[in-house]
Image: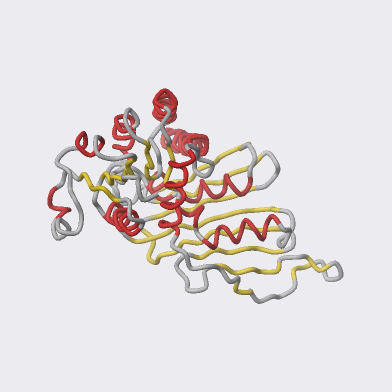
């Protein structure tokens, strides 16, 4: 891995995290950020390139950490020369995703999307417990991703917050979508949704919901999978991030016994670094299996369906 050279595109909050990770992995070549003020205090630590073209000529792969509306243009240009890891969402519509796939195949380049929660030790443990039957048959899934914070001017809360949870739910349930309904609210901007509640029915009769908001009075990042024998709750804002609950119905009382949760032990590996290690392995093997372009298709397709529902809802109001 030491022979690989990785470039970071965008040096905002998330770009700084990615730069740290790839620097710690010993493969960071440099950074391109057109807003020079963001590089203040870092020029002695990292190398900054004067242009995107110059960066692309100097690396084997880039990690794109810019606003979502720029992902398509930057990824398209990069894939003519190098491999790409792009933050979620990969693009803002299916047409752009198809074009990214076409260019990557034409040039035999690797494309991966940064749905980093797939590398979280809690999520890995959840998958293991589900596969070994700990919570029985899956019945329901839901997620709350709530915060009181920065409101994005160019994308609504659905496109900004929900991709992580959509990615996980699609991966856990593994079924075609039968129906989607979306309820939304515009509180501070009459053009951008600040909250959305998405209700999903899958073909295998499992239902799910996703609630996202950036105007919530408290922070919550909770993902729950309910089975007929138990439930797993992943709460990323708590010290004990993964809990197992009993939800099996008592045959005598015909009800769920009063229960207490059990803390599930997980590792403490950093998801972002684990994702970085996996990306480097993909570059060596020339193959992506987790968060590949096909998974990107599913996530963006889901988001497009939700967006169409919101447009329809707005017309009816």
Q: Can residue 317 be seen in this view?
A: no
Look at 34% across and 34% down and name the residue there: 82
> On the rendered structure, is 275 left or right of 247?
left
Measured from the top left, where is residue 312 in percent x and y?
Answer: 46, 33
Residue 1 against residue 229 in the figure, above or below: above
What is the quadrant of residue 32 in the picture? top left
Look at 25% across and 46% down and name the residue there: 10
Look at 32% across and 27% down and name the residue there: 80
Residue 6 against residue 71 in the figure, above or below: below
Identify which residue, 4 or 177, lies in the foreground: 4
Residue 58 against residue 22 in the figure, above or below: above
Q: In which quarter of the image is the C terminus?
A: top left
> On the rendered structure, is 163 left or right of 7?
right
Q: How many marks?
A: 0
Measured from the top left, where is residue 148 in percent x and y?
Answer: 34, 61
Look at 57% across and 44% down and name the residue there: 170
> On the rendered structure, is 248 left or right of 198?
right
Identify which residue, 227 or 107, lies in the foreground: 107
Identify which residue, 261 or 146, lies in the foreground: 261
Q: Can residue 124 be seen in this view?
A: yes
Measured from the top left, where is residue 167 in percent x and y?
Answer: 51, 46
Measured from the top left, where is residue 310 in percent x and y?
Answer: 44, 38
Colouring scheme applied when the structure was drawn? secondary structure
What is the quadrant of residue 255 in the picture? bottom right
Q: Which residue lies furthest to the right in this view?
A: 252
């Amino acid at each position: 891995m030491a022979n690989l050279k990785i470039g970071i595109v965008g040096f905002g909050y998330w770009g700084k995290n990615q730069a740290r990770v790839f620097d710690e992995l010993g493969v960071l070549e440099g950074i391109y950020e057109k807003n020079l003020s963001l590089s203040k205090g870092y020029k002695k630590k990292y190398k900054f390139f004067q242009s995107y073209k110059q960066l692309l000529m100097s690396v084997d792969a880039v990690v794109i950490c810019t606003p979502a509306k720029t992902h398509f243009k930057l990824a398209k240009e990069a894939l003519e020369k190098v491999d790409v890891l792009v933050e979620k969402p990969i693009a803002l519509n299916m047409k752009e995703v198809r074009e990214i796939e076409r260019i990557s195949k034409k040039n035999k380049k690797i494309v991966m999307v940064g749905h980093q929660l797939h590398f979280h030790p809690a999520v890995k443990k959840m998958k293991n417990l589900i596969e070994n039957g700990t919570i029985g048959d899956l019945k329901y899934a839901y997620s709350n991703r709530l915060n009181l914070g920065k409101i994005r001017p160019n994308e609504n809360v659905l496109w900004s917050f929900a991709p992580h949870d959509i990615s996980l739910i699609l991966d856990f349930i593994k079924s075609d979508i039968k129906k989607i309904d979306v309820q939304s609210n515009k509180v501070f901007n009459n053009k951008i949704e600040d909250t959305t509640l998405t209700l999903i029915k899958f073909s295998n009769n499992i239902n799910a919901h996703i609630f996202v908001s950036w105007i919530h009075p408290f922070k919550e990042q909770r993902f729950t999978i309910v089975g007929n024998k138990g439930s797993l709750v992943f709460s990323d804002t708590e010290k004990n991030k993964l809990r197992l609950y009993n939800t099996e119905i008592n045959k005598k009382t015909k009800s769920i016994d009063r229960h207490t949760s059990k803390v599930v032990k997980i590792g403490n590996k950093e998801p972002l670094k684990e994702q970085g290690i996996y990306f480097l392995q993909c570059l060596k093997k020339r193959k992506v299996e987790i968060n590949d372009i096909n998974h990107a298709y599913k996530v963006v397709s889901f988001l497009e369906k939700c967006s169409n529902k919101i447009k329809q809802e707005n017309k009816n109001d």
